[in-house]
Image (cartoon, rainbow, N blue to C red):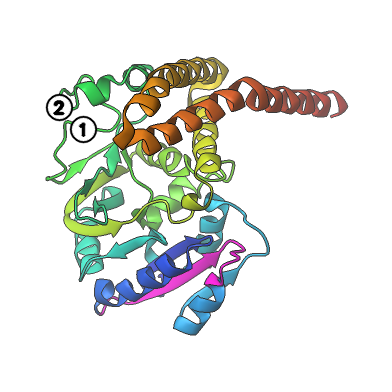
Amino acid sequence: MKPSNKLSIIIVSWNARDYLIKCLESLAQGLLGVPAEVIVVDNFSSDGSADAVEKFSPKVNLVRNDQNYGFAKANNMGIKLSSGEYLCLLNSDVIVGKNCFSQLLTCMDSNPNIGMLGPRTLNADGTLQRSCFTLPTVWNSFCRVFALDAAFPNIKMFGTRLMTYFPHNEMRAVEALNGCFLLIRRKALNEVGLLDEGFFIYGEDLDWCKRFGDSGWEVVYYPLVEAVHYGGASSSNAPIRFFLEMQRADLRYWRKHKGLKGEMLYYLMLLLHHTLRILGYAPLSIIRHRLRTVRSYKLRRSVESLRWLVTRYLFEKRSKMNEEEACHLTS
């Protein structure tokens, strides 16, 4: 059955009303004649996001969730409702550029081996936002722990995870893309499958990129199209909580793709990472007045992360293992 639309745009939102409306407004210039449907999945926002979307345009297919189902599950809801030959997963805090979708679709149509395509993204001030990465390994995680990627950003050996050595100025196949703006070929999606709903927020895009690559589809960075990504539209509501969720997602990724030993190795690296950050940020948050607020926040973030890692995370792991063992014994 041939898809009824060329493109389906899926936007998941949680308490990001103003950003969401700006995103929807930008689609008019971004599409410019491209036949598309727009699906907004609201994750039980309390800021009037859903009502604002309804008022903005009756043509938007709005899904009002009765709870926050997380990013992966909400996107899957939108995907299941979509009918496009291509799908675009777009964050609510992204502003798309003029005629960007026509260019992206032309690239996809011309390269049938591409399963996932991502544009060049910019910060709100127009500076480059790194949007392509390598998949996690022991080595690049080690470089992050000891800040070797920050100390030697232009050396490929050390700047591997964030690809800081890459100027983001040429089209190339990469291992992973930022999930804020992804164009997906439906044929590839049908082979790879939906987002893993075990990831509540964060990590699902990284996992998806790996699965696309493992299935033989190219994941490609395309800098000829630009978009502005404000970043943190939802996470700014509770930054520490979302930072912890990011680490939970990273640990789940390691468990899924590298097994229990890989997860435990990454767990130990996280412990070391935050211990070193606490030792570094503590004196800096006191003696460097100009950066005191930033350093104090990072210090608190690492303290909370370390506390979570040595208490709640291990408790959750132990509880889950006990549940799995009980289910096994009763089955």
Q: Position of residue 175 (x, y in %)?
A: 30, 36
Q: Are marks 2 and 1 in contact (CB under 8 Å)?
A: yes
Above or below, 6 against 213 in this view is below
Residue at 55% from the left image edge and 23% from the top image edge: 306
Which image quadrant: the N terminus?
A: bottom left
Q: Position of residue 321 (x, y in %)?
A: 72, 23
Residue at 55% from the left image edge and 33% from the top image edge: 248
Inter-mark Cα distance, 2 to 1: 6 Å
Residue at 25% from the left image edge and 66% from the top image edge: 101
> Sequence order check: which comes first, mark 2 or mark 1?
2
Pick the residue in front: 189 or 122: 122
Pick the residue in front: 309 or 284: 284
Above or below, 203 against 128 in this view is above
Residue 12 relative to residue 324: left or right: left
- Please tell me whether mark 1 sits on a helix, a strand or a loop: loop
Residue 43 painted magenta: yes
Residue 132: assigned label = none
The magenta segment is 33-49
How dense is the environment of label 2, judged by Cα within 10 Å: few (below 14), some, or many (20 and up)? some
Q: Which residue is mark 2?
A: 154
- Please tell me whether mark 2 sits on a helix, a strand or a loop: loop
Which image quadrant: the C terminus?
A: top right
The quarter holding residue 304 reads top right
Residue 164: assigned label = 1
Q: Position of residue 298 (x, y in %)?
A: 43, 32
The quarter holding residue 97 reads bottom left
Any part of residue 136 in sight:
no
Residue 300 relative to residue 134: left or right: right
Q: Amino acid at mark 1?
A: Thr
How dense is the environment of label 1, judged by Cα within 10 Å: few (below 14), some, or many (20 and up)? many
Q: Amino acid at mark 2?
A: Asn
Farthest residue in the right direction?
Answer: 330
